[in-house]
Image: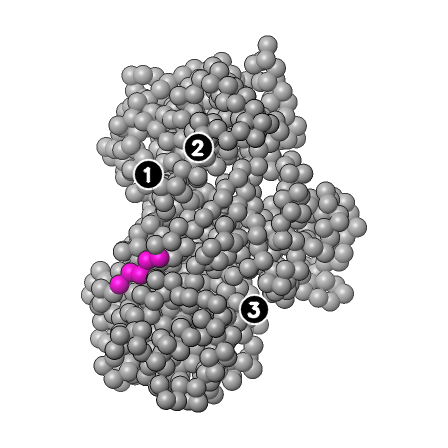
Amino acid sequence: MQLHLSPGYQRIASWLSAKGLHPFAFQEEAWQHIAAGKSGLVNAPTGCGKTFSVFLGSLIRFINQHPEDYQTKTKSGLQLIWITPLRALAKDIGRAMEEAIGELGMNWSVGIRNGDTTTAERARQKKQLPEVLIITPESLHLFLASKGYADAFKTVQVIAIDEWHELMGSKRGVQVELAISRIVNGQWSMVNKKPMIWGISATIGNLEEAKEVLLSPLSEEGVIVKAHMKKQIEIESVLPDEIENYPWAGHLGIKLIHKVIPIIEQSTTTLIFINTRGMSERWYQELLNHAPELAGAIALHHGSIEQELRLWVEEALHTAKLKAVVCTASLDLGVDFRPVETVIQVGSPKGVSRFLQRAGRSGHSPDAVSKIYFLPTHSLELVEAAALKNAIDENLIESKEPMLLCFDVLIQYLNTLAISDGFKPEEIFKEIKSTYCFRDLNENEWHEVLQFLVEGGKALHQYDDYKKIEVIDGVYRIQNRRLAMRHRMNIGTIVSDAMMKVKMVSGGYVGVIEEYFITRLEPGDSFTLAGRNLELVQIKDMTAFVKKSTSKKTIVPSWNGGRMSLTANLGKKLRETFNEVSELEHSTIQKTKKKKNTASLTGADNAETWADPAPELIHLSSLFQLQKELSHIPKDDELLIEQHESKDGYHLLVYPFEGRQVHEAMSAILAYRIGKIAPLTFSIAMNDYGFELLCDQPIPVDDTNASDLFTLDYLTQDIQRSVNSTEMARRKFRDIAVIGGLIIQSSPGEQKKARHLQASASLLFNVFSEYDPKNVLLRQAYQEVFDQQMEEVRLRNAFNRIRQSKIILTFPKRFTPLSFPIIADGLNRNNLSSEKLEDRIRRMQAQLNNAWSS
């Protein structure tokens, strides 16, 4: 039957029509495929109806199957599993689904299953499952850990994975792959009819691969449904009144807060995205200091704030009760806050996809304009703003690389199956091999994993604690109730530093803070959390007890999360943007400035004016002029190296524009290779644009040997020699050991402290290294260091690009605008002076500016 003639389509179409709505072509295409029983991936811009493309398709299919009694039919069993990466998404999606189901007069119910679901609600779901279950990857694995889980999946027709671009390329994505392989390949699957799988994705560069990873357990090619809709995005940079020619990373943002307040006042609701939780706390306080009239109209939202307050903020956003919310990535994804009119991105988003995702939070409907302001935290970030505009025009979206052979997730998953109904190795091996992540898993590795689960492997076979699984009549099970409970409490793949609860002495929960930060405070010290000034009273067990602080000086918490690094795509556009800069003459820029000012004063609509360089680049004219006079502005086919001597020593500065993580590995390799020329010791600093090697002796790099430093010969060996890969793997192993169940973060009545976790992981790392050096978890630790922390593929590509570029060596007499942010970062890291850091940097800026003006 043609889709348009089907009863399901006609019912949905008439319902939409009554609301003055009409389906988009991509939605109808998805409905057609779902009605026909096909699987696939929906790709559409944020705010264009991706959710309804799959959800309404499921309803159409159900109505087509039950045309006479779809409204009266009850207890239909679980029909649709909706996997979502964030708890914040569940409530919003559930609300939209319930509204549609109610208006269609259907007897479907919608349930939510995540860490916030109450025990009573879980018990209700166990008695009678809803037709739609919205669930996180971790909660889905907890579902698989319950006995008799197979019965729940017999009726499932569609598995939808929301925000697949966010899950793919992470261990949570691997969790999803394994869960899907169990549901679609289990013997209980509807008689020879496997459930359909539908991924929902906004911004991702490798769509075909994303679909292949998702549909791998089905062994089907599937389809891609792409919305050919160009979401209109308006990007405006917040330009500082004065440009500091010697920028210092991070200091500028707060100074521009007076430009943010008018934006908030003229918008219905504004989201202000900050990259770190610590800075979001500071921004919230500063906004209140500068505009006390906003008290009660602005709020703070990040992952360490207690759940009740976060939910209140989300609800207040829906109902337009708030003028602004200062937030982190906690509000990045698909929550439909329709009143949001404007988004402000503070500092570099580090990637094109993330910037688009955040822009899409405003104007969250297909015909609305998404308005986003870019507010720099230092002058050079304005170049990134121009690069972002170019990248978006070219649709240069980042790809997500799928993870391979995550043995820690596999071991956790097998333990999960072992505490429910158990598993037979020969059956489950085929299922696991059907996933993209484990398609290259070989028999030897499989037997090593099984031996590890049953006997503790070669290294741990003498310790009973690691013999978790028993084999009973060929079925692998965990019989010990204590082990089963401990495993249930630790299912998950997000391993963070130990968190401490923060509670008021008088009662009430404030949020959580990382242990490493709070244990450095003394009783009486004041800090900020959830926008409140708090005084530490005492620490008891894993709880910090606090009271309200009257102190005007408080410590802004720092969270120990890694600093985001520039993506390859944004780095590429940044280098290309410098091509424009290097070709600009100072006089041209000044003329353009005058021309624009004249045009705005006269109201002239001069087409030629807008063909001029990006306003961000024009605004940085004096900085670029100074960089040219002192050194050089590199084009995308050039690598700039600056050498400079100061009272601190000899500085070698290199500018690949490849991102902090690549620069971390590259600087270590160069230090090692230079060390082979002369035995020197270096101090290293870096940012997203370049890195510095600082030495107390002259650094032997010149035209004769500079290009040799970037040779691809022996690169892997030099990486291993230059970077302490063993120590990095040791730190990485802690996360792997926690996920794989070697180390238990929390047990009933106890919670391990971070330092104990690290000590346990180091001990196990040493045991494996000595007694089982080919252990799969040990191999994984080293592989993750190379793939993730060093980004070895990207590092190799960068070396290859530099080998084909022209190397420009300059010897500026003083620090340049490009070098100053790196030097400032180095001062902070290396503590080269007892002088207060901020005072020293400002004094250096003044001296350099005076030298230039004279």
Kindly check if marks 3 and 2 are in contact, taking CB atoms under 8 A apart as contact: no
Name the residue nearer the viewer: 60 or 834.
60
Looking at the image, tell me whether mark 3 or mark 1 is earlier in sequence order.
Answer: 3
Residue 596 is situated, as x and y percent measured from the top left of the image, at 53, 26
Estimate how packed mark 3 is, as few (under 14), some (14 to 19) or many (20 or more) residues with alpha carbons within 10 Å: few
* Tag 3 residue: 750
The disc placed on residue 784 is: none
Tag 3 secondary structure = strand
Estimate how packed mark 2 is, as few (under 14), some (14 to 19) or many (20 or more) residues with alpha carbons within 10 Å: many
Whether 579 is drawn above or below 86: the answer is above
Callout 1 amino acid = Leu
Estimate how packed mark 1 is, as few (under 14), some (14 to 19) or many (20 or more) residues with alpha carbons within 10 Å: many
* Tag 2 residue: 689
| Res 829 → quadrant | top right
Q: What residue appears at the point 37 percent right and 18 percent down from the top-left corner?
A: 809
Tag 1 secondary structure = helix
Callout 3 amino acid = Glu
| Res 238 → quadrant | top right
Choose mark 2 or mark 1, whichever is in front: 2
Q: What residue appears at the point 26 percent right and 60 percent down from the top-left corner?
A: 212
Q: Quadrant of the C terminus?
A: top right
Q: What residue appears at the point 46 percent right and 35 percent down from the top-left corner?
A: 386
Asked if residue 541 lies in the magenta stretch, the reply is no
Choose mark 3 or mark 2, whichever is in front: 2
* Tag 1 residue: 795
Q: Quadrant of the N terminus?
A: bottom left
- On the picture, is 97 further left or further right than 65? right
Whole-Å distance between the Cαs marked 3 and 2?
45 Å
